[in-house]
Amino acid sequence: MERNRQASRRRKRAPKPLSAPVLEELALAYVTRFATSAAKLERYLARKLRERGWDSEDPENAPDIPALVERFVEKRYVDDEAYARARSADLLRRGYGGNRVRQALGQAGIAEGVHETVQPGEAVKRRAALHLASKRRFGPFGQEPLAPDKREKQIAAMLRAGHTFDHARALVDASDEAQAHEWVAEAEDWPEELNDDDFA
């Protein structure tokens, strides 16, 4: 008896194929719930279509997902630049560097032109590097003097977080916390693409 129950649980009904209204409802629910880019929305809808199939009198005539996404862009339900700005600011606030920002925006399908408009300036990149070093107790923020192998590991961790080698070395090799803060302050008057308010 128990075995039969388990077998029936395993034999779940296949989900109903999607129709045009249901596909649009899924898209609307997705953009309401998540900050997203046009490319991410398109990938989500394509995945749903693969999982559930298409319910139509003409099964060959699958929906035009790019056209649906374009409608959402026109209605401003999806805004790649706003998404890129928010995602960049979030990553920088958490201590990730410009390279990680570029990678995350590329994965989200953000166009190169939009990348350029949200690229962080030097001061923002330095503050992000300082935040990571302070949070992870790298360089002068640690308890003990750095052994050479530990220094290399800390620099490698900063590189993995998307910081440049020069930034990682400047912080890990800083003689004390004051020098690390001075290094950030040096760039404060430089022009920046990303407003300071986005980082606050």
Image: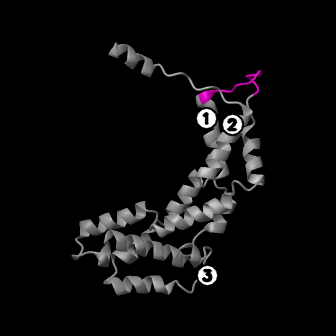
Whether residues under marks 1 and 2 lie with C-beta atoms below 8 angstroms apart, the answer is yes
4 shown above or below 50: above
Residue 23's disc number: 2
Whole-percent x and y of residue 182? 42, 87
Q: Which residue is mark 1?
A: 48
Give the Cα separation between the discs numbered 1 and 2: 8 Å
| SS for callout 3 | loop
Secondary structure mostly seen in the magenta stretch = loop
121 shown above or below 61: below
Kind of residue indicated by mark 3: Pro
Kind of residue indicated by mark 1: Lys
* Residue 181 left/right relative to 41: left
* Residue 114 left/right relative to 154: right
Q: Which residue is mark 3?
A: 191
Kind of residue indicated by mark 2: Leu
Tag 1 or tag 3, which sits nearer the N-term?
A: 1
Which of labels 2 and 3 is toward the front?
A: 2
Q: Do we see residue 109 in this rendering?
A: no
